[in-house]
Amino acid sequence: MQPSVSKGSEKREVPVCEWGVRLVLWVYAHLGRRVAVWLVGGIMLCAYPFLRKARRASRLYQQRWREHTGRPCCSGFAHLYTFACTMADRLACRDHLFGMDKVEVRTRAEYEELCARYRRHEGVFCIASHLGCFDMLRVLFEDPAQGQGGEIHVFMDTAATVQFARMQSRYASRSDLFVHSVEELGLALSMEMAQKLDEGAIVVMAGDRVWRAGAKANIRVPFLGCEADFPRGCFKWAAALQCPVYTFCLTEQGAHYDLRVRCLSADGTAPAQSLAEAYVRTLEEWCVMYPQNWFNFYPFWGE
């Protein structure tokens, strides 16, 4: 239950403790969230000295955040502790122990617009991020009030998170949620996804995790006052599919989560560069609001 660390094409995964996952789930189910977050706090306290790469990446992020805002940021331990609490809620969400009653919607109009598209089986491309937990989107789409929608297809770098992807599959609660590797992206899969979008599927891809190194593979955009790489393929694919494009974040705020939704392209005609710039501006705005919730624990701006 720890973050993966990646840099360009070099990716390493921190091992996921299976017995720890089961223990947290049992405590969450039988003793409640408060005891579960105390438990993950204790686990993080013991693990914190050994998470050198994550701590170093967190310090760099805090430095960029402070320089950009001129305000003090969260501590490194608070940053990783928030991540651990979010992971506990993420597992609880899959076990139906966490629902929309614990979510406060902060962008009501765009949230309802996205829900309406979902109910009408209109295909939507969602560019997620590591701000909060994009996998908990299932809280929204499993809400009985939203009715029955289409399939959800999540693209992620499974090569960098083999154990985490395996755990995700094991604890998944939806039979219509499909996880793909970004390495699978090609003409055949693009055609299949275009068909799925026509049938009302939701396609989810993270826009703030580079898949491979190189200028051709990435777009450089200013983020928190310093240029950083973002995956070009994500925005090119979103533009090529010509469907509505959204981004969102679900961020831990203690006893509840804040949900924010923003439409980046209502008609799907925005070019890739415009989508990337709008996405990064939104991510930066939300990172300023929720500094403890950006869980990209690798050297995002380089060493």
Image: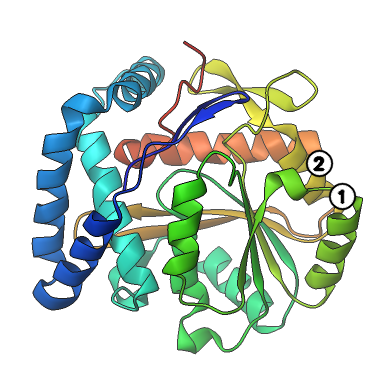
Q: In this view, does 162 lie above or below 142?
A: above
Q: Which residue is drawn at 57% across and 36% down?
A: 208
Q: What mark, if any, has residue 254 been given in the picture?
A: none
The answer to whether one can see residue 249 in this image is no
Q: In this view, does 129 lie above or below 47?
A: below
Q: Which residue is drawn at 81% across and 56% down?
A: 268
Q: Which residue is drawn at 87% across and 50% down?
A: 240
Q: Which residue is drawn at 44% across and 36% down?
A: 13
- In this rendered view, identify the residue nearer to me: 259 or 152: 152
Tell me the colour scheme of the image: rainbow
Q: Is residue 135 above or below residue 270?
A: below
- In this rendered view, identify the residue nearer to me: 67 or 41: 41
Going by the image, does 100 lie left or right of 77?
right
Question: Measured from the top left, where is residue 301 in percent x and y?
Answer: 51, 17
Which element type, helix, strand or loop, lies under badge 1?
Answer: helix
Q: Which amino acid does label 1 sit on?
A: Ala
Question: Measured from the top left, where is residue 92 in percent x and y?
Answer: 30, 69
Q: Which residue, given by chain and number where applicable, does mark 2 sit on?
A: 236
